[in-house]
Amino acid sequence: MKTKKTNQPETLPKQPSPRRAAFVAALATALLTALVVWWFNGREGPNDRADRDLAAAKLAMDIGNFATAEEHLRSAVERMPESAVLQHNLGVLYLRMDRKADARAAFERAAKAHPPEAQAVRAEEYFQLASISVTEKDWKRAEGELQQAIAADPNRRLFHARLIDLQLGSLKEPAAAESSAARFLRTCGDDAENLHAIGFIYTQQKDYVRAEFWGREAVARDDTVTKAHALVANSLARQGRGREAVQYLAPLLEKQPRNGELWIARARVAMSLGDRRAVIEAADQAVRALPNSFEAHLIRMQALGGAGRLEEAVAEAGRARAVAADATDHRRLRTEEATLQRALQMQNRLIVGGAAGSDTTGARP
């Protein structure tokens, strides 16, 4: 049997309204979001969430957003209160915020949290505590904390050096410093490098007799260590024995005429003698031998400034800035440069004043 065809159009399925479609899409998004959150919360443990907080805190610290960094770190610490890493980072943050009491508490918690096998890392916490005590001028406390750092990690040369420096300087305990120096050598070795390091500390504390002694000890151990020879020469010059220093360096420079460190030492000796010409000549040699040395350019800048060649000295300061390695170099240079600029301004004013005073346009009397 044939089906009878009709001329009526087929009925299309009804389309949803735009509002209903938007509602369905929003509901699907919400369900998907809830599913993702549930999945992360179900699979991500406290360690993972703490790691994410720590990473976020570091990013915030990098841009100086300390409040956000603290929020993330405290959130991480709540999840993992026994984490030494989190406590250490919290201490670092508080130091940057100049909240020393909070920083101290965080570093103390970090020191306690490190396991027995992490002595070297624990030593770093004690060193941070000692640094806080130094800023607070609590010298004895700093000494005790440095002793704890050394006990935890006896092979860290920096800890020994800071303790000797503290005992010589702020504590004024030379006998204790000598004892610490002896322990340093017993623990880390009595090689020329360590002997020179002790001598350099005495130089920083302006005890040039002991600096000379340690410098000579370093040279006796290894006479190829140039900085030890420089230490001896500078120590002699600082004691007012400049001529001896010149004689000490002369045969060394004859053997090593391109040794920049020795030329820097020769320039400093000449400076102590007030021999400006010799200072500039030695500084020129130092720069030629060590064109990328901050110390070489600094001594040449000082030599030129001392000779009144101020514009050349300012130009040399620019070259020193280009090779400055760290913030300490930049601070030293800023101080020197400020003095140079003041001298140059005064010189220019005198030149202008002198020119204004020499009026040759008037008629003769």
Image: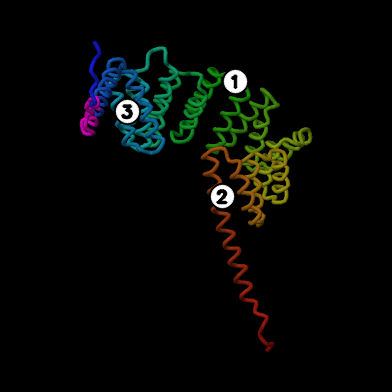
Tell me whether the residue at label 2 lies in contact with that at label 3, contact meaning CB atoms closer than 8 angstroms.
Answer: no
Residue type, numbered disc 3: Leu
Q: Quadrant of the N terminus?
A: top left
Amino acid tagged 2: Glu
Task: Tell whether 92 sits left or right of 180.
Answer: left
Residue at the image point whose x is 24% and y is 31% from the top: 22
The picture places residue 80, in percent across and down from the top left corner, at 30, 19
Among numbered discs 1 and 3, the one appearing first in the sequence = 3
In the rendering, which numbered label is found on residue 336? Answer: 2
- The numbered mark at residue 327 is none
Q: Residue furthest right?
A: 254
Vertical relation: 269 (above or below) 17: below
Characterize the local packing of mark 3: few (<14), some (14-19) or many (20 or more) Cα atoms within 10 angstroms. many
Q: Which residue is mark 3?
A: 73
Instruction: Tell me the CA gap for discs 1 and 3.
Output: 43 Å
Per the image, label 1 sits on a secondary structure element best described as loop
Residue 11 part of the magenta segment: yes
Q: Quadrant of residue 6?
A: top left
Q: Nearer the viewer, mark 1 or mark 3?
A: 3
| Farthest bottom residue in view | 365
Q: Earlier in the sequence, mark 1 or mark 2?
A: 1
Mark 2 residue crowding within 10 angstroms, few (<14) / some (14–19) / many (20+):
some
**CA separation in Å, label 2 and label 3:** 41 Å
Residue 256 relative to residue 139: left or right: right
Magenta region? 8-24
Please name the residue shown 47% across and 26% down the image: 176
Q: Residue at x 70, y 26 (%)?
A: 224
The residue where tag 1 is placed is 190
Colouring chosen for the image of the structure? rainbow
Q: Position of residue 25 (x, y in %)?
A: 26, 28
Q: Is residue 154 magenta?
A: no
Q: Nearer the viewer, residue 40 or 56?
A: 40
